[in-house]
Amino acid sequence: MAKATFAAGCFWGVEDAFRQVEGVTSVTSGYTGGTTKNPTYKDVCGGRTGHAEAVQIEFDPARVSYLELLAVFWKIHDPTTLNRQGPDVGSQYRSAIFFHDPQQEAAARASKDVLIKEGVFKKPIVTEIIPASEFYRAEEYHQQYFEKQGIKSCHIQ
């Protein structure tokens, strides 16, 4: 198994999108990229932890590639809006790829470069590409939120 970590706005919709991908074995909603140890949802929403709402994905590279996961990432959110996705505003909703090794970093940068070169987005891409750091699992009620609430989707594209 391999790991991938992405932030693309509210983690509920991001988690759900990646759970639909064949070869993904688990998706965990949580917080990463900040300085506060063991943050709570309330802490992160307060905007002072530096953490983003993110998902950590375990996947089988024999069934789905990291490049395929990157394609899903770019498709499910707007990487041109700084610190916001739809109605959600704040640095916790930023767009970020947290790479786990040099190969993931290279793939992430190359995929971003292709999107820029091809002019896929009309505005500049603001997605951060940074090393993965400590990932803190979100509270249980955030895990598989859509299933628990009987919701089919949220505002992600």
Image (cartoon, rainbow, N blue to C red):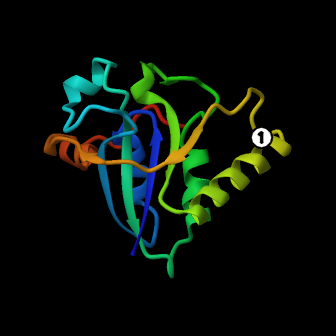
Q: Nearer the viewer, residue 129 or 122?
A: 129
Q: Is residue 25 above or below residue 69?
A: below
Residue 137: percent from the left, percent from the top? 23, 47
User: What residue sits 18% from the left and 46% below the top?
Assistant: 148
Residue 130: percent from the left, percent from the top? 53, 45
Q: Is residue 38 above or below residue 109?
A: above
Residue 107: percent from the left, percent from the top? 65, 60
Q: Is residue 30 above or below residue 41?
A: below
- The quadrant the C terminus occupies is top right
- The quadrant the N terminus occupies is bottom left
Mark 1: amino acid: Val
Count of number-bearing discs: 1
Q: Secondary structure at mark 1?
A: loop
Residue denoted by label 1: 120
Q: Nearer the viewer, residue 130 or 82?
A: 130
Q: Nearer the viewer, residue 31 or 148?
A: 31
